[in-house]
Amino acid sequence: MATAEQIKSLIRSHLSADNERFYTLALQMAAHEAKQGHHALAHDIRQIVDKSKKEKSNNLIKFPQELSGMVHAENTSSTFSMLVLPDELKTRIKRIVHEYRQQEKLKKHGLSNRRKVLLAGPPGTGKTMTAKVLAHELRFPLYTIQVDKLVTKFMGETSVKLRRIFDHIRDEVGVYLFDEFDAIGGERSLDNDVGEMRRVLNALLQFIEQDVSDSIIIGATNNPALLDRALFRRFDDVLNYNTPDENAVRHLIENVLGAFKGRIGWKSVFSESVGLSHAEIDHACRDAIKEIVLSDKEKVATKDLVRTLQERSQTHQR
């Protein structure tokens, strides 16, 4: 049967409404039961998880057919406890939620809540996770717009698609994440800029400025230096992300390993984590978990985690 630590972790994740963590723990329990030879029970657990995920995805509002493939819709279950960020950054994210919930009070004094936010920083540092947390905390669906797929070679087509997206933002309240924002928000003075892209950028600036919906609009960029300066003035707040420090690394690893965490030599782990993003460290932890599960072990040891971190570091350097 499941270990006492797994059961406690499962209960904690349920009580904190951390569905993603709950699913992960349930699947870990299924793997544990399968290893014990309880294949029917393991199969039943996996089916329950899959059914729950499918039911949640079916409740989403769909985007127009012509935007299919450019927009990904999901109901998220990411909570504040999953954000491994500096306290100052988490405070500013919580402020977005608090202002949204108190927007009527602000309106009485002629003030508006933060709705348009730019997230800037290297890949894998928590920008997408922030959007997921905001969507979960506000109980909204998350719509991720793949900005690079919006841009086409046909005159005027990109601007038309942008208009359809902002019509949807107005009509259906949600959190809208414009991923790879620099693909369309590049500096207008760049030498390789063309007339069509200038028109697209001007249209984007106008749509953002004129939007008065109740939706949250988030732009995410890995290269803020490429963005047109005029874009920054359209956002209510700009949050800057960086690779995690030692405290964040430890918090992240303990959170991901959960019941699989053994005795960890943190000095060695910190040394191998230098320069790695949150996402890369997360992947390294999950790689270590898979290795010990397949090796019929119970806990991730220092050497297991150091090895997978080294693999991620080598990939990162290449």
Image (spheres, rainbow, N blue to C red):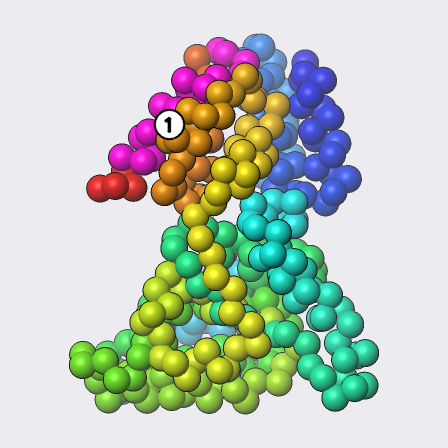
- Extreme left residue here? 191
Magenta region: 296-314
Label 1's element? helix
- Say which quadrant the N terminus sits in: top right
Horizontal and vertical percent position of residue 179: 43, 64
Front residue (pair 314, 275): 275
Does 304 appear in magenta?
A: yes
Horizontal and vertical percent position of residue 12: 74, 34
Horizontal and vertical percent position of residue 283: 43, 36
Three-letter amino acid code of the residue under disc 1? Thr
| Residue shown at 34% from the left, 64% from the top | 223
| Residue 307 occupies quadrant | top left
Q: Residues within 10 Å of mark 1 (few under 14, many from 20)?
A: many
Horizontal and vertical percent position of residue 208: 50, 83
Front residue (pair 163, 282): 282
| Residue shown at 59% from the left, 67% from the top | 175
The reply, left or right, for residue 299 in relation to residue 227 is: right
The reply, left or right, for residue 18 in relation to residue 234 is: right
Does 188 appear in magenta?
A: no
Q: Number of labelled discs? A: 1
In the image, residue 142 sits, relative to residue 47, either above or below, namely below
| Residue 106 occupies quadrant | bottom right
Residue at label 1? 308
The reply, left or right, for residue 195 in relation to residue 65 is: left
| Residue shown at 56% from the left, 45% from the top | 84
In the image, residue 315 sits, relative to residue 143, either above or below, namely above
Front residue (pair 227, 179): 227
Q: Main secondary structure of the magenta part?
A: helix
